[in-house]
Amino acid sequence: MTAETVINFLETLKIPEGKTAGEPLTLAEYQKRFIRGAMDEAIMVACLSIGRGNAKTALAAGIGLGATMGVWDDQPRREIILAARNRDQAKIAFNFIVGFIESLPEGEQELFVIRRGAKLEVEYQANGGGLARCIAADGKSILGGAPTLAILDERAAWEREKGDNLENAILSGLGKRDGKALIISTSAPDDANTFSRWLDEPPPGTYVQEHRPPFGLPADDLESLLIANPGAKEGIGSSPEWLVAQARRAIARGGSALSSFRNLNRNERVSTEDRSVLITIDEWLSAEVDPDALPAREGPCVLGVDLGGSRSMSAAAFYWPETGRLEAFGTFPGQPTLADRGASDGVSDRYVQMKERGELFTKGEATVPPGPWLAEIVKRADGATITCIVGDRFRHAEFTEAMQKANLRIPFRQRGFGWADGSEDIERFRRALFDGHVKTLPSLLLRSAFAEAITLIDPAGNHKLAKGRSLGRIDAAAATVIAVAEGARIVARPETKSRGFVWAS
């Protein structure tokens, strides 16, 4: 079998660098699994997503060397492409190939011509001949080629336009000689990235192996760290102790350091650009508590509502400012199904999971009916005293109609989502969160919403809420922000006391 031939060849090589340099190469189980999946005859494209430091580039370079030598492919004049974001990254793969060649018998080494000049190439002069080319992500570099194997290294980091051009050129060339493409990378920072779409929406003939832990766990959670870094258990890359220590350093530093650790070492889809993030996932996790630590429903309750449009989610958030308790719910129309909607939004089965957890429900067919939906939401308050409903002032007429249909006689507070009201609400929300005045049960709905939420900043430094990507759903985050901000205003208002009678002298 081709997969076993690949595995047997790789294990004849020696590790070219690192703390185990010179020792025989022993493949880990996750590497063998990827090879078996990628080398299946029905597979044209194989995708591997895994944390940094798990020898994915070394694995790809070893496969590229074997393909160049024709160990399992006897086509004459074989052409192997190793593409990376830039020349420096391509040179890493090139150096691995050269290092592996140096572990071969001397007679075998003499069959190679290694070019280190303007072009990074390795040519094999036996068994029909083979050429391995290491190139940067420029679509013009490959036009007219007919590769038998293409390896796209760190695909998530490629520049969007040039990267897509190169990928398209490579894939079109592979069809000429029944070639395969191996796309390997740490996770992209968002669902819209081309690499993310390969993982989430694989076309027929695609093998996907993704080592990504469940969403929203603490950065130093060892079990999930080992999901993203399976090599740590088999002596490849970083040790479990180092990963935990680095996670705690990143937590202590926060900001971009923590975002980068989550993206690169935990293989999570977290943006490493935090200048316009509403809050980080770790900042939000500080608000999640166990059921026995959740504050009571005491005092007045604020209901924040983000009324969805004809196709989007409607969301509501209950906030009790005296205790800090927060509850949030989201709603989609019944059509399309949550599974289909999750696939089209690039979040897989996340909406189905939210429904199973009781955080999301469906109402209506093609649209969510505002009146009946608002009545359903108020029922979920279970008799709590709702002081006011807070919503978007530009949809005041819709709110008025919905409240009339739901037979609700509750004051409506209008808030704008622009620079003026939005900046104040965002600041009040952040202050309440950071001061520990927001407590909720673990919520996949809210984790997902805050992961998608960013802020746009005007020249004066004012913030307003926005989506991080076009398919993102931030409705629950918007409802939470305005509910908590209004709750903070209620707490800050001085109590009016009766002065009693004053007799004139």
Image (cartoon, rainbow, N blue to C red):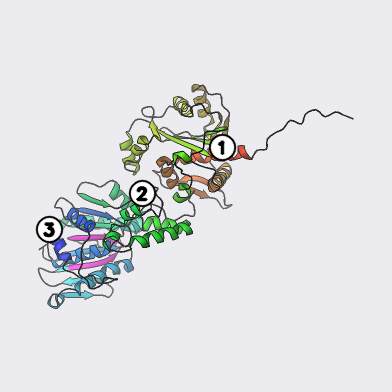
Residue 192 got which mark?
Answer: 2
| Nearer-the-camera pick, 143 or 175 | 175
Q: Is residue 128 left or right of residue 157?
A: left
Element marked by disc 1: strand
Q: Residues within 10 Å of mark 3 (few under 14, many from 20)?
A: some
Q: Answer yes or no: is residue 272 visible.
A: no
Amino acid type, mark 1: Arg
Pick whichever of labels 1 and 3 is earlier in the sequence.
Answer: 3
| Nearer-the-camera pick, 55 or 71 | 55
Residue under pointer 1: 415
Q: Is residue 107 left or right of residue 228?
A: left
User: Alpha carbon of mark 1 to alpha carbon of mark 3: how far?
Assistant: 63 Å
User: Alpha carbon of mark 2 to alpha carbon of mark 3: how far?
Assistant: 34 Å
Quadrant position of residue 87? bottom left
Position of residue 146 relative to residue 487, above or below, is below
Contact check, label 2 and label 3, Cβ < 8 Å? no
Report the label total.
Answer: 3
Residue 257 in the image, given as x and y percentages of width and height: 44, 59
Pick whichever of labels 2 and 3 is earlier in the sequence.
Answer: 3
Residue 445 got which mark?
Answer: none
Amino acid type, mark 3: Thr
Residue under pointer 3: 2
Q: Residues within 10 Å of mark 1 (few under 14, many from 20)?
A: some
Pick whichever of labels 2 and 1 is earlier in the sequence.
Answer: 2
| Nearer-the-camera pick, 361 or 418 | 361
